[in-house]
């Protein structure tokens, strides 16, 4: 994969750090599939929040308002990512930081993946280059 190609890292990141890929607009159906496979009850239209409460991270690519990757988990409940999730996201960030939306760095900070200094300075952008050209 060339540097300028968009990485295919969209879906659900398990607490074990494995990505379960899905199309950009397939998070709800993929969440339902995962919950059924894990034999976990859920309410209709609550699939994503049910999965996030169990420690999964939703990985999305958005073009609304700003373009780039976003990461949604249970940070608002005071839960950080697992060590395996941190490892997976750091590996992603080291190679594909230029594809992360500006608010995606805030997501990573809230999940405990990066520090406040890394969030504001974004050292990975200098390393991998700007994708805007």
Image (tube, rainbow, N blue to C red):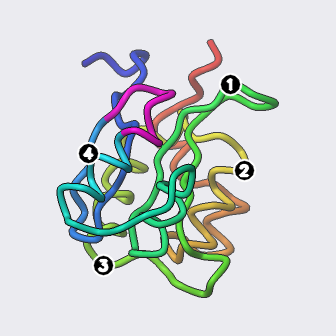
Q: Earlier in the sequence, mark 1 or mark 3?
A: 1
Contact (CB < 8 A) between labels 3 and 4?
no
**Picture quarter with the N terminus:** top left
Spatial CA distance of label 2 from label 1 is 12 Å
Spatial CA distance of label 4 from label 2 is 23 Å
Secondary structure beneath disc 2?
helix
Residue positioned 25% across, 56% down in the render: 36
Which one is closest to the eye, mark 2 or mark 1?
A: 1
Contact (CB < 8 A) between labels 2 and 3?
no
Q: Earlier in the sequence, mark 4 or mark 1?
A: 4
Along the viewing direction, whichever of 43 and 21 lies nearer the viewer: 43
Residue at the disc numbered 2: 103
Determine whether 118 is above or below 7 in the image: below
Q: Quadrant of residue 41?
A: bottom left
User: For the stretch drawn in magenta, what is the main secondary structure?
Assistant: loop
Residue at the disc numbered 4: 20
> From which residue to which does the magenta span run?
22-29
Which one is closest to the eye, mark 3 or mark 4?
A: 4
Residue positioned 54% across, 63% down in the render: 49
Spatial CA distance of label 3 from label 4 is 17 Å
Q: Quadrant of residue 37?
A: bottom left
Task: Tell me if mark 2 has few (under 14), some (14-19) or many (20+) residues whose alpha carbon lies within 10 angstroms of its own.
Answer: some
Measured as percent of width and height from the top left, residue 7 is found at: 37, 28
């Amino acid at each position: 994969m060339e540097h300028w190609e968009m990485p295919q890292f969209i879906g659900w990141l398990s607490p074990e750090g494995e990505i379960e890929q899905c199309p950009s607009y397939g998070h709800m159906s993929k969440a339902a599939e995962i919950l059924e496979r894990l034999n976990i009850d859920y309410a209709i239209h609550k699939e994503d929040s049910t999965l996030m409460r169990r420690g999964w991270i939703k990985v999305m690519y958005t073009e609304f308002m700003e373009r780039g990757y976003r990461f949604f988990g249970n940070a608002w409940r005071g839960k950080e990512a697992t060590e395996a999730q941190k490892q997976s996201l750091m590996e992603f960030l080291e190679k594909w930081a230029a594809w992360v939306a500006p608010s995606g760095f805030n997501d990573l900070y809230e999940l405990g993946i990066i520090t406040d200094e890394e969030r504001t300075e974004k050292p990975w952008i200098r390393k991998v280059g700007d994708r805007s050209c």
